Amino acid sequence: MSVRGTLAAAAAFGMLAGSAAAQDAESYTIGVSIPAATHGWAGGMNYHANQAIERLGEQYPNLEFVLSTANGAAEQVSQIEDMVAVNQIDGLVVLPFESEPLTPAVQSVAESGAFVTVVDRGLSEEGIEDLYVAGDNPGLGRVSGEYFLERLPDGGKIVALRGIPTTIDNERFDAFTQAIEGSSIELLDSAHADWNRDDAFTVMQDFLARYPEIDAVWAQDDDQAIGVLEAINQSGREDIQFVVGGAGMKEMVKRVMDGDAMIPVDVTYPPAMIATAIELTALHFTSPTPIAGSFVIGSELITQENAEAFYFPDSPF
Amino acid sequence: MSSVPLEQERVPARRWVPDVKTLGPLIALALLILTGALVSDGFLSAGNLTNVLSRSAFIGIIAVGATFVIASGGIDLSVGSMAAFVAGLMIVVMNSLVPVLGPGLATVIAGMACALLVGLCAGAVNGALITKAGIEPFIVTLGTMGIFRSLITYVSDGGTLSLASGPRTVYRPVYFEGVLGIPWPILAFALVAVLGQIVMSQTAFGRHISAIGSNDQVARYSAIRVDRVQMMAYVLQGLCVALATLLYVPRLGSASPATGVLWELEAIAAVIIGGTLLKGGYGRVWGTVVGVLILGFIGNILNITNFVSNYLNGAIQGVIIIIAVLVQRGRRS
């Protein structure tokens, strides 16, 4: 497979994409299936997926890409079925909406002999995919928790916001609570704000009404952090020292860069991981490089010193 | 499709007689506030009450418009998506006017005017498709709901549209400040509610809405201009959405594809809890206002206590909707 890929690439470059007949024999179709851009992070991911496809399409004339975005697990399953039936894909890059419903669908793609790359959310069975590219959800929680320990060595009262009730949110939250366990930091309460600014604003307003003293807030996500900051602003409360979001939204990275005391740090969870996955999958078809296993993109702490490297003003996120 | 003839039920003419059926929503609201006061000290504080009322103002203003649409026998599922679309366009317009009109008041006023115009047109599109093309309201607004949602996603490139800091600073007080300690959103909601109640109960337009909702054929024979009244109801709904958006944008200064998701169902729920008939023929604006407050306070009480899991918010709202309708309809023979 990969030898044929190499030949195809060589042929493509050699003949300047001249002979269509020769290319038909060795061209590959890669399907990319991701959730639709319904919130900031997914919007960033859609942007990076489109960028990667455009770039690779120019680079490798023998690769065809089919991109589909889904609004739910059921729709995503149908789109993957269509990719197999209509486009006859040789490779699939998929960010599953939910693990369970997508597992059988992706499994049948793998059984058809296609190269499968799963991104960010693992399937519910091991060993289906050839390549797994993921962000580090427990890492995001742990890094955030460690920052709280560092900032509040003598303890303090904090509240936490959670996202949409999913594995992703559970992994982040559990790692965070584990990181602060045994310290004198008291987690007053946590509530789900569904990674949505408006819900976060509402939840934070009610936390402020309920707790007369809050030292810091773990908002987990940058969209949630925006709602939290606005609620704190409106209340005029001075006791909250800082808010930690996550994911690396450009507006938040900018605030870290500018040394905003309320947003001292951010924790990465890059939507560009989809581009990493598409690149590696393309590499499998175009070079003899062995591509298999898993590739975990670490969650890093963005501080004022290194913020420059994480700032992408052109991305929608 | 079953061909069983539906039992035609005549809605008795209602006069304002204070009984349990009429006062149901008010009693429920009073019980809810009492519960809140008992389980949390902070519940009755001025801060918490203004928070909840301000937050409820968006859905509240939209629901006043929805009362007219539903009372006329229609339904509008597109309001949440429409709100997101109007908010997105408003932000784009204001951002692009900053170099022309400067970052101050002129830009904000232009943005507000644009929002009202877009809301009016969006409502007119719904109304025209329903009255001129004769498609059922449910289908038309299901379609436009998807259209507006996709448009905001397209305009925002799947990300978030943020208002530039100049107009943001000028505009922010519209949500966060007010007069005599009462924030603007609450005042706007109160004004819209009072006007809505007067129009519904005291004007020919309000009576025509109910008549069409009861039986549009009879209304047509009674020389009511059915198409025009229905059109007006959807335009009014569009205007209410635009008004709500005027208050929504200054809060976080942003709009995204996640803005206003499921607002249509919250608005419809508030209208139904308030005693308006889903099949049309009778609408009660003050009841809708009580319905909105009930929904707002449920969420708030669940947030400020560890009484019940937050996950059950939807379940409690669902139970209240069903009980509200049961109490008001009484037993069906």
Image: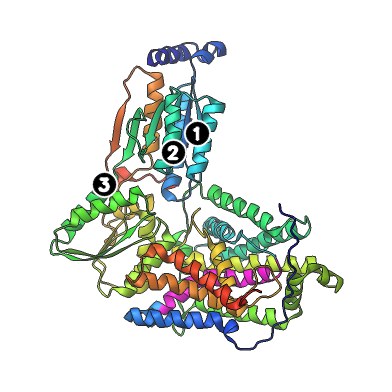
Query: Hey, which quadrant is residue B214 in on the image?
Result: bottom right
Amino acid at dot 2: Leu
Provide residue B275's location: percent of width, then percent of height.
61, 76
Looking at marks 1 and 2 on the same chain, the residue that comes earlier in the sequence is marked by 1
Is label 1 in contact with label 2 (beta carbons under 8 Å)? yes
Mark 1 secondary-structure assignment: helix
Circle nearer the viewer, 1 or 2: 2
Read off the chain for label 1: A
User: From the viewer's perspective, is B88 left or right of A312?
Assistant: right
Q: Which residue is mark 2?
A: A102
**Magenta highlight range:** B49-73
Q: Write down the residue under mark 1.
A: A80
Residue appearing at x 54%, y 13% in the figure: A18
Q: Residue at x 36, y 33 (%)?
A: A276
The residue mark sitting in front, 2 or 3, is 2
| Badge 2 element | helix
Question: Looking at the picture, which amino acid does disc 3 mark?
Answer: Pro
The residue beneath circle 3 is A138
Query: Gap between marks 2 and 3, in whole Å?
Result: 22 Å
Query: Is A296 drawn above or below residue B55 in the view shown?
Result: above
Is A77 drawn above or below residue A286 in the view shown? below
Q: Could you tell me residue A186's position as x and y percent? A: 20, 65
User: Could one spot residue B174 in this view of the protein?
Assistant: no
Q: Measured from the top left, where is residue A157 in percent x and y?
A: 22, 67
Q: Quadrant of the C terminus of chain B?
A: bottom right
- Prevailing secondary structure of the magenta residues: helix
Q: Is residue B270 visible?
A: yes
What is the CA distance from the residue labelled 3 to the residue labelled 1? Answer: 29 Å
Instruction: In this rendered view, identify the residue nearer to me: B327 or B221.
Output: B327
